[in-house]
Structures are given as structure tokens and as C-alpha cells.
Image (tube, helix red, strand yellow):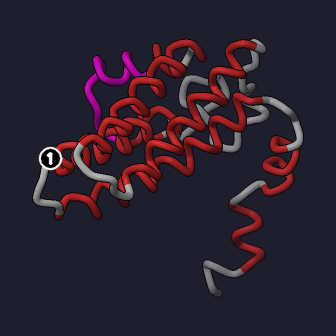
Amino acid sequence: MNFLSPSNIKSLINFEQIAANLKSNNFAIYAKYLSYLTIPLSIIFGIANLFHVNLVIIFSIISLVQGVVLLFIEVPFLLKICPLSDNFVAHLKVINDDNMKKLILYAALSIVQWCSLIFKATTLIIVAICMTCSFISYGIAFKKNQHISSEESVIKSPFDDDFTV
């Protein structure tokens, strides 16, 4: 039996929940989905720009680190299955619990990536744009006091009461 058959993929991904989330007008959900897009782009373009001969290399390394940190923030079940220090997990939990802290984090991350343009315009601008879009969405969610409930989330959080590994 083929693991990547359409019926298996449909059982792994809750497409109905994703469609309902996109229609919900909840900007916290939009920000979460934009963040899911930002994570691989940050890692991919971080690697791709490592081969520049100027100071863009620094921003490439920062982009790689940002991608990994965002992965642990936005896909929190990884905190349970990856061996991480308790201090690191505690800091991520504080950020994950508050939209204002996520707003500040995404503002700082996007500013750092926009600064890479000082040295050379590269594909890191895509990372900056995605992070800025996430920042704007988290900002609107914060302004409207919108959050993501565990029922709306496509990926479970280990901080939820009903989480099991």
C-alpha cells in the first residue's frame, strides 16, 4: 500500500478544519498559517544564501536559526519529542502563550531580515516579507483580541490538557 496515496494524506491532514479556519476571519489563525509558510522558506533561503561572499552570510545564518526557533514556537509538539533544555522550553512557552510576545518576536525577526538588504538584495527578502505578513496578522489578532483555540488548531500543542504523544 502506498503511503502517499490520496486517502492516506486526507486521513493525516484535516482539510475541512483548514478550510473552516481560513473562512473564520481569525487573524491569529492566518498568522499561524503564514508562519508555517515562513519556517521552510527561512531555512531554505538561509541555506541558499550561505554561499555569498559578503556579510549576507550573517543574515543567512540568522535566517536558519530563526527558522528553527519558529519551528519550535509554531509546531509546539516538537517540544515534547526533541531533547531540549527546560530553560529553552520555558522561554518558548512564554512566547507561545501571548500574542503580544509573538507580535514583538515577529517584528524583531522581520526587521533583522529587512536589514539584510543593506548589504545586498537576495532571496532573504522573501523571508522578510513572510515574517512581516505574520507580524501584521499577529498585530491585527492582538488588536482584535483573537486567539487560537485547541479545536481550531491543526497541530496540537503539548501545553494542551488533551495532548498525548
Q: Is residue 11 left or right of residue 34?
A: right
Q: Quadrant of the N terminus?
A: bottom right
SS under mark 1:
loop
Residue at 63% x, 25% y: name it. 138
Whole-percent x, y for residue 44 in the image: 37, 60
Which residue sits furthest left? 53
The residue closer to the viewer here, 86 or 125, is: 125
Q: Residue at x 56, y 12 (%)?
A: 100
User: Vertically, is 144 above or below 122?
Assistant: above
- Residue 29, image x, y percentages: 72, 34
Residue sitting at x 56%, y 47%: 36
Looking at the image, which is closer to me, 157 or 95? 95
Q: Amino acid at mark 1?
A: Leu
Count of numbered marks = 1
Task: Please rate how many residues cluster around mark 1, counting C-alpha atoms within 10 Å: few if below 14, some from 14 to 19, many from 20.
Answer: few
Q: Decide: is 80 above or below 127.
A: above
Q: What range of the chain is rendered magenta?
A: 82-93
Q: Which residue is mark 1?
A: 55
Answer above or below: position of 161 versus 38: above
Which residue sits at x=40%, y=42%? 81
Q: Is residue 84 magenta?
A: yes
Q: Is residue 88 left or right of residue 8?
A: left
Image quadrant where residue 141 sits: top right
Magenta stretch: dominant SS?
helix
Give the side of residue 48 with respect to residue 4, left or right: left
